[in-house]
Image: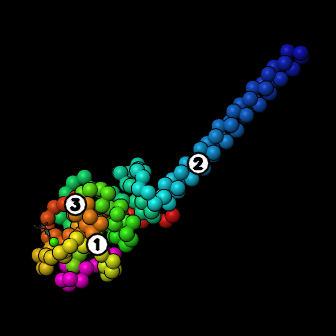
Amino acid sequence: SEFIKKSYCRAAVILLGLLCLFLLIGFITVVFLCEYKKYVISMLKSSQPKLLTDCQGNWVAFSDSLYQVSLEKKSWEESRQDCLQKGAHLMIINRREEQNFVNQFKKSLWIGLTDSETDGRWKWVDGTRMTTSYWNSGEPNGGRSENCGEVRFYDSENSWNDAPCSIEKFWICEKRVSP
Ligand code: 2F8
Ligand code: CA
């Protein structure tokens, strides 16, 4: 019976040890997940552009949106379709910070701006009228032949140009995320 007592005792110690180990692992997991969540939220809220990938392509977090610069060139309409397919839209620029952000890519990029419906009436792809604009000097100058907006003169804050929609260019998609 002494032997049985010792065996029980050993089993109890082992069980207790395992329990402690599981608790510790659980605790570490919870702390890690909480810290990671805090980190992601702080990245999304930060006004500085920082690289943050979401495992489904290289999206860059800035303010309350994610942005993705294309790796290939397409017409404006095909670019618009690509963004829609990704649950996003061609970039809509509402704030000066966003305008300075897009210029940092130092690339000619289609954005979600067009006056295809009525010449000179520039609209964003969400149907809203363009109010604040960042046209380069002399732009828009294309009349009926240049109906799509691009970021082109990225060394200047006023970097926009109107270009023919059929030209193949890189583009930038924007996906809004709730902060
Ligand atoms: O100098 C600005 C001017 O540059 C080009 O024309 C030479 C652009 N054309 C195309 O991208 C096809 C114009 O849109 C732009 O205004
Ligand atoms: Ca132009």
Q: Tell me which corner region of the image, top left, top right, bottom left or bottom right, holds residue 153.
A: bottom left
Q: Position of residue 94 (x, y in %)?
A: 37, 72
119 sits left or right of 82 in the view: left
Are the two marked residues, 2 and 3, in contact with CB atoms closer than 8 angstroms?
A: no
Q: Which residues are magenta?
A: 116-126
Q: Which residue is mark 1?
A: 134
SS class of the residue under badge 1? loop
Residue carrying label 3: 108
The residue nearer to you, when weighing 133 against 61, is 133
Whole-Å distance between the Cαs marked 2 and 1?
A: 39 Å
Point 89% across, 16% down: residue: 1
Between residues 54 and 100, which one lies in front from this camera angle? Answer: 100
Displayed-image quarter of ligand 1: bottom left
Q: Nearer the viewer, mark 1 or mark 3?
A: 1
Image spot of residue 7 (x, y percent): 81, 19
Three-letter amino acid code at the position of disc 2:
Glu
Q: Earlier in the sequence, mark 2 or mark 1?
A: 2
Q: Which residue is mark 2?
A: 35
Distance between the Cα atoms at labels 1 and 3?
Answer: 14 Å
